[in-house]
Image (cartoon, rainbow, N blue to C red):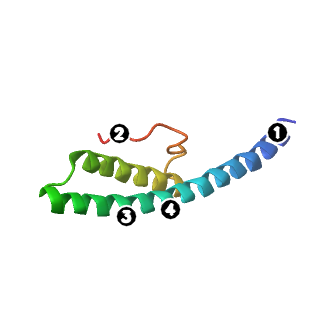
């Protein structure tokens, strides 16, 4: 009886994992677009002020950590689902 419960729970878990993976692929694609936008803004800021914006640089660091979290989730390194299902990564 317990074995039947395990066999039905496993496909549900895999289906949820697949759904989260699809959502994380979409989040990754949106994040790449954001990275391109951030890069252009940071370059313009550098041209105008002769120095990069520190707040944008800090966000870039946390965005890099977010990319890493997504890749780790998609490649089964971790089971923790990244933002928006957990906290946004800090730059530490």
Q: Nearer the viewer, mark 4 or mark 3?
A: 3
Task: State the image coordinates of residue 74 (x, y, percent, origin top left).
Answer: 53, 56
Q: Nearer the viewer, mark 2 or mark 3?
A: 3
Secondary element at image label 1: helix
- For label 4, the residue is 29
- For label 2, the residue is 90
Q: Is the residue 28 above or below the residue 92 in the image?
A: below
Q: Are marks 2 and 4 in contact (CB under 8 Å)?
A: no
Nearer the observer, 27 or 39: 39
* Quadrant assignment for the C terminus: top left
- For label 1, the residue is 5
Task: State the image coordinates of residue 39 (x, y, percent, origin top left).
Answer: 31, 61
Q: Is the residue 37 above or below the residue 92 in the image?
A: below
Q: Is residue 60 left or right of residue 77?
A: left
Pointer 4 or 3: first along the chain: 4
Secondary element at image label 3: helix
- For label 3, the residue is 36
> How dense is the environment of label 2, judged by Cα within 10 Å: few (below 14), some, or many (20 and up)?
few
Residue extending farthest to the front is 48
Task: State the image coordinates of residue 9 (x, y, percent, origin top left).
Answer: 77, 42
């Amino acid at each position: 009886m317990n074995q039947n419960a395990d066999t039905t729970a496993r496909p549900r878990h895999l289906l949820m994992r697949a759904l989260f993976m699809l959502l994380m692929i979409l989040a990754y694609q949106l994040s790449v677009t954001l990275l391109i936008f951030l890069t252009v803004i940071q370059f313009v800021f550098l041209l105008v002020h002769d120095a990069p914006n520190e707040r944008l640089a800090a966000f870039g660091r946390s965005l890099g950590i977010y990319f890493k979290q997504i890749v780790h989730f998609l490649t089964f390194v971790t089971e923790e689902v990244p933002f928006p299902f957990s906290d946004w990564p800090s730059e530490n």
